[in-house]
Amino acid sequence: MFESLKGEEFWEIARRYFVLNGFDGILTVLGITAGSFSTGVGDPKVLITSSLGAAIALGVSGISGAYITEKAERLKKFKELQNDMLSDLKGSIHEKNVTQRAIAISIVNGASPFLCALLSTLPYFLPLFGIGTMEIAYYASAGIALSLLGLLGGFLGKISRESLISFALKMIGVGVITAALSLTLGIGG
């Protein structure tokens, strides 16, 4: 069905959406984690429902927003191609590409933040089932989030043919800033 996904342009867009939205999913759960830690939330169900609720919202937003946006952009290009060729291209591979690429990009756009947020949420299931403590779960979630940020940064370093470590540290730095700002929520409370 998705034979139109072979082009370089598609993979550049998909890669960009994957990193951008994975970053959002990770930082969202990291913010929930640090804010909840700072206010002393001790119930893992609160963290699980808050984080998964955010993951679902990011996923739905990513899928629907990207589909509508990509479809509009691709329809514009398709209509320009029809005008340039002075031909009706309905039913052609060009018309199929409009929908196929919009669907594929929207799946990447929605799955990335959902999966990254889900991975950062997993430690909270342990105390829910009586394994370990909430304190350990908080630290494990933050550790997973920062590790995922480092991996995304390393990936960007590889793409740009720059230092993997430099890009990883930049992404981790943003995570640390996010956590530090979110920790201030508990000050004075």
Image: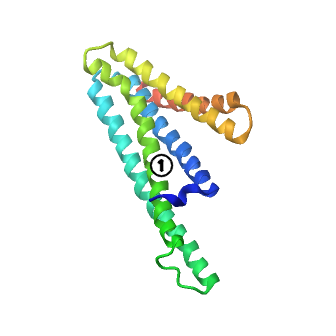
Q: From this view, report whether residue 108 is shown above or below residue 176.
A: below
Q: Is any part of residue 121 visible from this angle?
A: yes
Tell me if 78 is positioned left or right of 66 in this view.
Answer: right
Q: Crowding near pointer 1: few (<14 within 10 Å), some, many (20+)?
A: many
The one nearer the camera, 40 or 24, is: 24
Q: Secondary structure at mark 1?
A: helix
- Most extreme residue toward the right is 162
Indicate the quadrant containing the C terminus: top left, top right, bottom left or bottom right: top left
Instruction: In this rendered view, identify the residue nearer to me: 118 or 183.
Output: 118
Question: x, y percentage for residue 40?
Answer: 34, 21
Name the image quarter holding residue 126. Answer: top left
Residue at point 50%, 62% (across, down):
70
Q: How many marks?
A: 1
Residue 128's spot in the image, x, y percent?
Answer: 26, 21
The residue located at (49%, 36%) in the rendering is: 27
On the picture, is 88 further left or further right than 115? right
Image quarter hosting the N terminus = bottom left
State left or right for residue 170 relative to residue 1.
Answer: right
Outermost residue toward the bottom? 86
Q: Is 12 placed above or below 81 here?
A: above
Q: Is residue 189 visible?
A: no
In this figure, which residue is indicated by the disc labeled 1?
108
Snapshot colouring: rainbow
Q: Where is residue 52? Give x, y as percent.
A: 34, 37
Viewer-proximal residue among 79 and 140: 79
Query: Which quadrant of the view contains residue 6?
Result: bottom right
What residue do we see at 48% from left, 49% from top? 108
| Amino acid at pointer 1 | Val
The x, y position of residue 5, in whole percent, is 54, 56
